[in-house]
Amino acid sequence: MQQHRVVVLGAGYTGAVAAGRLAKRLHREDVAITLVNAEPDFVERVRLHQLAVGQELRPRPFREMFAGTGVELKLARVTALDVERRTVAVDGEAGAEELAYDTLVYALGSGWDDQGVPGVAEHAHHVAGRSGALRLRARLAGLAAGEPVVVVGGGLTGLEAASEIAEARPDLRVALAARGGLGDWLAPKGRRHLREVFDRLGITVHEQAAVTAVEADRVATADGGSLPAAVTVWTTGFAVHPIAGATTLEVTDAGRIVVDATMRSVSHPDVYAVGDAALAAGPGDKPLRMSCASGLPTAWQAADAIAARLTGGKVPQVPIRYFNQCVSLGRKEGVIQYVTADDRARRAAVTGRFAARYKEFVCKGAAWSVAHPTLGLPTRRRRVLPAPARAGAAVGATA
């Protein structure tokens, strides 16, 4: 039997975990797993605000992580996807080439979103990727005492970036511009602690301050005002990689691939999408938000569904739900906000140093799951069925 070709695009949290989980569940003689990524090292995206202020992150080379797993790592940039021909065009160490697949796992994730605001692309910095964080790091290092830094965006990324910069560089004038109220999605205890920490760090907060333009030395707000900014850090959200939107896959207006409960494309059953690239429904049919908390469960779900369908097993259905939101506020403070299954704040929250330690534990756990992609799973690999047998086994299987 010819090997079933699985190609995984992207080796962030979700792609790396999906590839490792598939390698553990499927027999090596039956399946060829190729993991495509543009960089040789895993990037801990949830720590990029730390990298931006000068902290060093532990290198995690993919070749070491996947040594002995049977996963082939291809260092290349994805340039095109043809879901009708089942091919991926890449450009990497061997130049331009085309990869054929039988099953595709699309995990290209997301990058920063300038939301069409004038001047953002030219003047703002971000922490949505390693290269952006390093550029911001160099820019911050060159600032003199007293110069102003404005973080735009009051979500989790904005709160973490503002507090990390203010803690690392107390000599700078750090401000945060939020479209709404500061931490207005948190329960009262979390909001109070957030304000206390921001006050202690000397962060000036501008609430109800939608930014309408970014210039080299300031940002303009919707009320006609402006905020001085030697550096602007843009953290207002993420945009997915545009490649899926250029295919015949069913995608949303924002380019996210529409999937079912097993992360399988609703238009192309040989394609699975995980992480930020997927529009997946959570509790109450609310779309899962772009986050590591959503991404890892979608990777588990997709890998287990693929393995089950290839081996004739029962396709698992494990509801994806939320438990908490973890916010680091520098290295010594944090907020752990407990949430409902559909991500609404409960009254309970943990704050202070314990919350900071808890967030650190979560970050280490996520990185460990990527760095040890095949540990903690059953050691018995299942044999892949021939295609006709798979088709018969799939009849009546859980979808």
Image: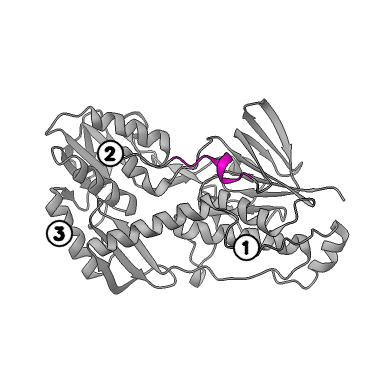
The location of residue 65, given as percent across then percent down, is: 56, 45
- Residue 62 in the magenta stretch? The answer is yes
Q: Which of labels 1 and 2 is toward the front? A: 2
Q: In this view, does 167 lie to the left or right of 122?
A: left
Q: Distance between the residues labelled 1 and 2?
A: 40 Å
> Residue at position x 85%, y 66% from top?
392
Eyeballing the image, is 70 above or below 193? Answer: above
SS category of the residue bearing label 2: loop
Q: How far apart are marks 3 and 2 (CA)?
A: 22 Å
Q: What stretch is highlighted in magenta?
A: 59-67
Q: Classify residue 308 by image quadrant.
A: bottom right
The residue where tag 2 is placed is 53
Between discs 1 and 2, the one toward the N terminus:
2
Question: Where's the C terminus, which quadrant?
Answer: bottom right
Badge 3, how many Cα within 10 Å: few under 14, some, many 20+? few
Between discs 3 and 1, the one toward the N terminus:
3
Residue type at mark 3? Glu
The residue where tag 3 is placed is 196
- Residue 324 in the magenta stretch? The answer is no
Q: In this view, does 201 lie to the left or right of 267?
A: left
Residue 260's disc is 1
> Residue at position x 52%, y 51% from top?
370
The location of residue 98, given as percent across then percent down, is: 72, 33
Residue 320's disc is none
Q: Is residue 3 left or right of residue 57?
A: right
Q: Distance between the residues labelled 3 and 1?
A: 42 Å
Eyeballing the image, is 361 above or below 277? Answer: below
Residue placed furthest toward the top: 95
Residue type at mark 1? Asp
Q: Which of labels 3 and 2 is toward the front? A: 2
